[in-house]
Image (spheres, rainbow, N blue to C red):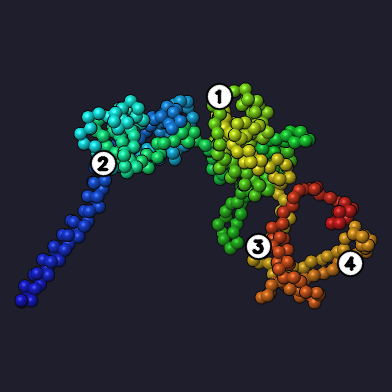
């Protein structure tokens, strides 16, 4: 065979190979997508297009939900916030539900549980003049295979689908309601008020977030940091960890139950709240308010924005600090443990101990220790240290916090009387 003929054959093989790659293999994804679309019980619908869903919940409650501006709300049997994730899962299940098989020659829907006893789910796509209505009947289980019989409301064709694909529709009404008590971003909080009553009477604590200019070392660009301060009933730095932890707990607070009827027991439980929390947010004129009342049903009753009554686990509320000292800055010492390499201690004998020296007579014992390759060791020639215990001691010093605030300032005599 001549080289020219060989070259022509190679070129033809190359062209055929390219055809197979680009027209056969390259189009396989599109053909697979087309096959999947053909299997869908409601083809041509995307979950994001569904704007309304009506169904009977597992506990027998007729309910209807509507989506507006990306948020779901329950409009029947009463108006309330809906769980967006749960409703998104329902919308996805309805839009993407694939048919696992069809029943040919079905003369009636009743033998498949698709007659009057069927569960019916109705949903709307779009809104206004462009809206379209769809519906799905859910019947009994197939004899084998773990499937459920289904049919669309607009025809009597009987199909079946895998049961697990309909799990999102098998919920009680409480599972579809919004359990989040307060909807806010902790970074948007500008003020926080916590009111309670202790043995000395009512306490109304007000904290504010303060923006403070800062400049990084070696950087000419000015930045800003935020800190919390107590504004009332006195002015003082606030404990950042306590405030941030409380805000995080409130942001993640979830209802354990719902109270829809204003029955006397519920009103009595919330009439005189144990704690009232008010959160001021940037860009929002009306602050969020949460009132925490007494025990009710399965937990402690709370009243959130809009007067909505919920119950929450009692232990979640017990974690809310109710002492002024808990909100005050209580850091005694703080440093980076990795940077600690030398510690100097001056130890005095306790004059209150039996046989101890008289005040003013005790000479301090000086201990100087440094961190080396084998751990902490004395460098002043004194008795050896236990390196592990001394390491624990330094670790405690790195983040030492007070349990309470005894006084904001004392004179010399008072400090002397306290051994300070």
Give the number of the mark in front: 1 or 4: 1
Give the number of the mark in front: 2 or 1: 2
Query: Left or right of 89: which side holds 16?
Result: left
Name the foreground residue: 405 vs 96. Answer: 96
Q: Earlier in the sequence, mark 2 or mark 1?
A: 2
Give the number of the mark in front: 2 or 3: 2
> For the C terminus, which image quadrant?
bottom right
Query: Disc 2 designates what residue?
Result: 101
The crowding category of the residue bearing disc 1, from other C-alpha atoms within 10 Å (few below 14, some 14 to 19, many at least 20), is few
Q: Residue at x 87, y 51 (%)?
A: 414
User: Are the residues flagged by discs 2 and 1 in contact, CB closer than 8 Å?
Assistant: no
Query: Disc 4 designates what residue?
Result: 363
Query: Left or right of 127: which side holds 188?
Result: right
Query: Disc 1 designates what residue?
Result: 261
User: Are the residues flagged by discs 3 and 1 in contact, CB closer than 8 Å?
Assistant: no
Name the foreground residue: 71 vs 339. Answer: 71
Q: Secondary structure at mark 3?
A: loop
Q: Earlier in the sequence, mark 4 or mark 2?
A: 2
User: Do we see residue 96 in this rendering?
Assistant: no
Query: Disc 3 designates what residue?
Result: 336
> For the N terminus, which image quadrant?
bottom left
Residue 330 on image: x %, y %: 72, 51
Residue furthest to the front in view is 143
Query: Left or right of 135: which side holds 363?
Result: right
Is residue 151 shown above or below 387?
Answer: above
Q: Residue at x 90, y 57 (%)?
A: 352
Name the foreground residue: 36 vs 163. Answer: 163
Give the number of the mark in front: 4 or 2: 2
Q: Give the CA separation, mark 4 to mark 2.
A: 92 Å
């Amino acid at each position: 065979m001549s080289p020219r003929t060989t070259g022509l054959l190679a070129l033809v093989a190359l062209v055929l190979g390219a055809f197979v790659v680009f027209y056969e293999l390259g189009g396989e994804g599109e053909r697979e997508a087309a096959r999947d679309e053909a299997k869908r019980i409601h083809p041509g619908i995307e979950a994001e297009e569904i704007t309304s869903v009506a169904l009977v919940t597992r506990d027998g409650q007729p309910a209807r939900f509507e989506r507006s501006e990306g948020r779901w709300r329950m409009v029947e049997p009463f108006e309330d916030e809906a769980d967006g994730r749960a409703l998104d899962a329902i919308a996805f299940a309805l839009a993407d539900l694939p048919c696992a098989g069809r029943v040919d020659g079905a003369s009636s829907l009743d033998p498949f549980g698709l007659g009057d006893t069927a569960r019916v789910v109705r949903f709307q796509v779009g809104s206004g003049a462009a809206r379209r209505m769809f519906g799905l009947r859910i019947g009994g289980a197939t004899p084998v295979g773990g499937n459920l019989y289904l049919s669309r409301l607009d025809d009597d064709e009987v199909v079946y689908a895998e049961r697990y694909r309909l799990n999102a529709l098998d919920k009680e009404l409480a599972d579809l309601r919004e359990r989040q008590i307060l909807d806010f971003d902790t970074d948007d909080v500008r003020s926080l008020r916590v009111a309670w009553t202790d043995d000395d009477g009512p306490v109304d604590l007000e904290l504010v977030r303060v923006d403070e200019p800062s400049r990084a070392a070696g950087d000419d660009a000015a930045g800003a940091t935020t800190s919390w301060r107590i504004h009332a009933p006195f002015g003082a730095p606030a404990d950042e960890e306590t405030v941030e932890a409380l805000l995080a707990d409130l942001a993640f607070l979830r209802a354990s139950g719902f109270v829809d009827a204003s029955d006397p027991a519920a009103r009595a439980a919330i009439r005189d709240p144990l704690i009232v929390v008010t959160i001021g947010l940037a860009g929002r004129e009306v602050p969020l308010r949460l009132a925490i009342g007494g025990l009710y049903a399965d937990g402690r009753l709370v009243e959130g924005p809009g007067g909505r009554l919920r119950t929450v686990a009692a232990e979640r509320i017990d974690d809310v600090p109710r002492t002024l000292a808990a909100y005050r800055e209580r850091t005694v010492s703080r440093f980076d443990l990795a940077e600690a390499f030398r510690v100097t201690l001056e130890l005095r004998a306790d004059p209150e101990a039996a046989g101890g020296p008289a005040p003013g007579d005790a000479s301090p014992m000086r201990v100087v220790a440094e961190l080396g390759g084998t751990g902490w060791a004395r460098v002043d020639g004194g008795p050896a240290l236990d390196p592990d215990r001394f390491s624990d001691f330094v670790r405690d010093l790195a983040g030492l916090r007070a349990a309470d605030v005894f006084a904001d300032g004392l004179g010399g005599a008072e400090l002397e009387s306290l051994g300070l």
